Image: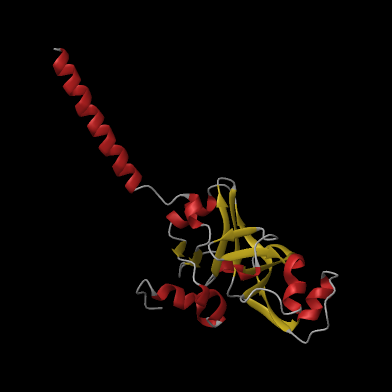
Amino acid sequence: MRLGLVAAALSLATLLSAAAAHAQANAPARAQDLVGKILVAAPDMSDPRFRDTVIYIGRHDAQGAFGLVVNKPQGIGPLEQVLRAFRLRAEPTGARVTVYWGGPVEPGRGFVLHSTDYGTNGALMVAGDLAVSRVEAIAVAIAEGRGPRATLMTFGYTSWGAGQLDREVQNGGWVVVAQDHGLVFAEPDGTKWKRAYSGFGLDL
């Protein structure tokens, strides 16, 4: 009788182990898996603010998520104007900068998505070889020619509450693609969204 109980217990343990492995293999991506990834709005995005947007995700955890829209330029102007807006001083420069709409939250706050060759000591978020810093922490270095090799400046940001982004991704509102320097920094803004979908074989 005891041998029968042992065999039954072992059989149950095997079944439970197999079930756990199956559940793990088919579980949704964990929140931290989206940090550093690119979100691409689905063609039928219902929120007009985010139609055709491409968003870099800098933070994604149990409390929520933070992202910067990288394909909605708002204008091009002298970098000097940005420095003055933040009461920053740098050597005189004729550099110009494209400013992007980073999202609807706190449009007065500026951020720079940049390559990590500059260093990450003052960065707010780092994922792979990209980082997010406040404009105030990096604009002077950019103006003086000692900043990162690749930069993209935004005003405002995008945020999601706890579990919100996970649900939107699971419901098909966003497609997740890998971090891509060429897409973020080199691709023309007008074709970033379409190129991001090209890897999925969609005819847009």
Residue at 34% x, 74% y is 201
Q: Position of residue 52 (x, y in %)?
A: 52, 72
Residue drawn 30% across and 41% down?
A: 21
Front in this rendered view, residue 8 or 137: 137
The answer to whether any part of residue 115 appears in the image is: no
Instruction: Identify the residue at horizontal 59%, vertical 46% (top origin).
Output: 63
Residue 185 lies in quadrant: bottom right
Determine the image quadrant of residue 132: bottom right
- Quadrant in the picture for the N terminus: top left
Asked whether the viewer can see residue 29, the reply is yes
Q: Nearer the viewer, residue 148 or 30?
A: 148
The vertical placement of 34 against 141, above or below, is above
Left or right of 39? Residue 79 is right
**Farthest-out residue, top:** 1
Say which quarter of the image contains residue 120.
bottom right
Q: Position of residue 195 (x, y in %)?
A: 45, 78
Q: Which residue sits furthest bottom?
A: 94
Please state, as top left, top right, bottom left or bottom right, where the C terminus lies in the image: bottom left
Q: Is residue 40 above or below residue 93?
A: above
